[in-house]
Image (cartoon, rainbow, N blue to C red):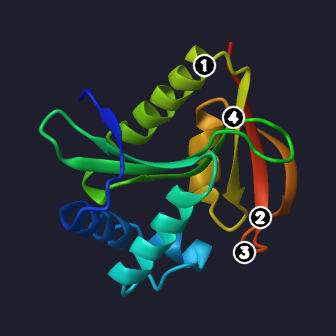
Amino acid sequence: MPTLTLAPLRFSAEELTEVVDLYAGNPEYWRAAGEHDPEHIDADRVEADLREEAGTEGCEVLLARDREGHLVGLLCLLDRHPTDGYPWIGLLMVHRRFHRKGVGRMLADLLEERFRGEGRHGVRLAVLENNPAALGFWTSLGWYEIDRRADRQHDRPCIVMHKELH
């Protein structure tokens, strides 16, 4: 398994080009989410969305890179959800070149270690109901359903999942 590093998105032209490529390689997600046209990912819109995310209090956008410096994934995190106080994973997306190679699992493990190290007792996320692959992924990592409700930003049906951090 490769070693992965996480660093904040700096919004350089090179990074944004890499992120647009990562988004374009995940059309199934965008079909389910409805936020971007899966056949044409607009770079300006990606940048605007990520700047809004990164500019929101308690949020951070991280790029995951392998040992060679290749972008392998993107993560959006919320330090404390305003309703429940838990940290949340808003998005974990893996580059298509690294699908089914354990990278998603490694990224989830890194986040769990990080939150555990901060003394957190659990972490949460929401999976779109129309994304059974994502539900299967998170369930295989020990996450479990705690609620079903619409997401706050786009009013899409979601499955809220939780994982205890021991």
Does the CB distance between marks 3 and 2 fall below 8 Å? yes
Q: Distance between the residues labelled 4 and 2?
A: 18 Å
- Name the foreground residue: 35 vs 13: 13
* Mark closer to the observer (3, 4): 3
Query: Label 4 belongs to which residue?
Result: 143
Against 139, residue 31 (above or below) is below
* Helix, strand or loop at mark 2: loop
State whether residue 18 appears in this view.
yes
Query: Label 3 belongs to which residue?
Result: 154
Q: What residue type is labelled 2?
A: Asp
Query: Label 1 belongs to which residue?
Result: 118
Does the CB distance between marks 4 and 2 fall below 8 Å? no
| Marked residue nearer the N-terminal end (3 or 4) | 4
| Marked residue nearer the N-terminal end (4 or 2) | 4
| Marked residue nearer the N-terminal end (1 or 3) | 1
Check disc 3: other Cα within 10 Å, few if <14, some if 14-19, many if 20+: few
